[in-house]
Image (cartoon, coloured by chain):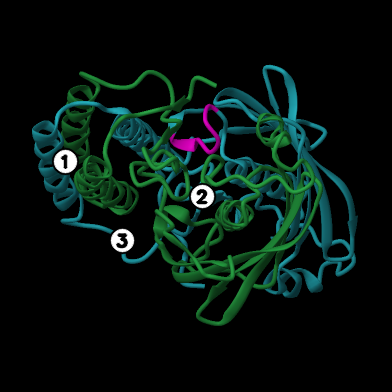
Chain colours: A cyan, B green
Amino acid sequence: MTHFRAEDATEEEIAREAALYAPFTDAVRQLADATLRTTVDEDEIRAVQAEIEALTARLRAARIPGSYGVRYRPSGGGRAWGNAVVGLRNPIAPPVVTSVGDDGRVTTEFHLGAVYEGPPGLVHGGVVSLVLDQLLGQAAGAGGRPGMTGTLTIVYRQGTPLGPLRGEAWIDRTEGIKTWAKGRLLGPDGVTAEAEGVFILPKWARAMLAADDPETPVLPDRSYFQ
Amino acid sequence: MTHFRAEDATEEEIAREAALYAPFTDAVRQLADATLRTTVDEDEIRAVQAEIEALTARLRAARIPGSYGVRYRPSGGGRAWGNAVVGLRNPIAPPVVTSVGDDGRVTTEFHLGAVYEGPPGLVHGGVVSLVLDQLLGQAAGAGGRPGMTGTLTIVYRQGTPLGPLRGEAWIDRTEGIKTWAKGRLLGPDGVTAEAEGVFILPKWARAMLAADDPETPVLPDRSYFQ
């Protein structure tokens, strides 16, 4: 898989990169929000557009080919900075920042603004599923059972309002190469959506781990797939 | 619902706005892609960031409060330009552009680049569900049965590669206020994911239509919820 890149950056270099790219990417998130909501006049729109195009050309003077992929950290962990939900360098990611408790439960508090809208004033139902897929996948990974999503079911209890939200996910059970994870999103008025997903350990991971214990494969890296 | 805005723009004015905002928003999409993939040096990142912040301030000199919502067209149809999947003015929307066939089937061809990545080289599983939720909702709406997503189930058949994709959705059956829609995404190697969703006609729409025919409510507007 060419998109898995090993790198020789030290943890200090990675921290320095994060300090550079996090505010840079956030500036583009703010621009996206402003782009959607602006009511400045036509001439100003065209003038700003020309400047944006010039900035894009400057950034493209040097760039990676293809997509961002996942980089290995020296510690062995994955660095999913391109991820559409949690990616520090991805302007379309809110980004969702998660914590993993001692019990393996994944929790997060995050904010969804105007660009995540579906029905007026509400988070797009598909964005609800997008975030939940990520949280469930991370819960599976946090339990040493990373995998590709096999199935995902979302039950919508009420509209999810734009604004501050909470999310949580955990492993419900495992069976061979399958892990069932559950989770939910909560708004100011309580649970807005519940999710269940099945995550399948990929073949290459099974092969890697076969010599170890084929019945209960465990991978140290939590973020290959998230 | 304050986010439903009536407007007195003519169809010509709307076409003119589309011609202005579509390339403007696309320029921001290109910037987002460049932001994720750039390898220019630190000084250049900081310089570009400062310019982006200045452009954001210019756009914010005048803006709508809160989220974009859905505007009524003079024709009575909705205009979901802020929508996270299909929104012409939303930089995080690919955007997906759909067609509705005479049989009510919703189809689309679209492209997902690096910002939609999950596993290396593949579309994020949650982005797959995001697009499918939108397509299924539009199929329900195209059949005169718009609604909020009640449940959504995605079955992932294989990884969805970044790049050119197709999608389709249709109504499977209806029962009272519920509509079951199905759909799927296809990549170069065939079907990558299948979806089924239940869409619930909202209370206000039921009330509006009660006098008409409470058993088979039909709304002319296909896009209130998409």
Q: How many marks?
A: 3
Query: Percent position (x, y) of residue A161?
Result: 60, 25
Residue A207 image offset from top left, x and y in percent = 74, 75
Badge 3 crowding class, 10 Å Cα cut-off, few under 14, some 14 to 19, many 20 or more, is few
Q: Which residue does the numbered mark 3 point to in the structure image? A: A64
> Can the viewer see residue A3 in this picture?
yes
The residue stretch that appears in magenta: A115-121
Which mark is drawn over residue A106?
none
Residue highlighted by disc 2: A80
Question: Helix, strand, or loop for circle 3?
Answer: loop
Quarter of the N terminus of chain B within the rendering = top right
Task: Find disc 1 in the rendering and name its residue.
Answer: B44
Q: Amino acid at mark 2?
A: Ala
Give the vertical position of B61 relative to B128 (above or below): above
Question: Looking at the picture, which amino acid does disc 3 mark?
Answer: Ile
User: Do discs 2 and 1 share a chain?
Assistant: no
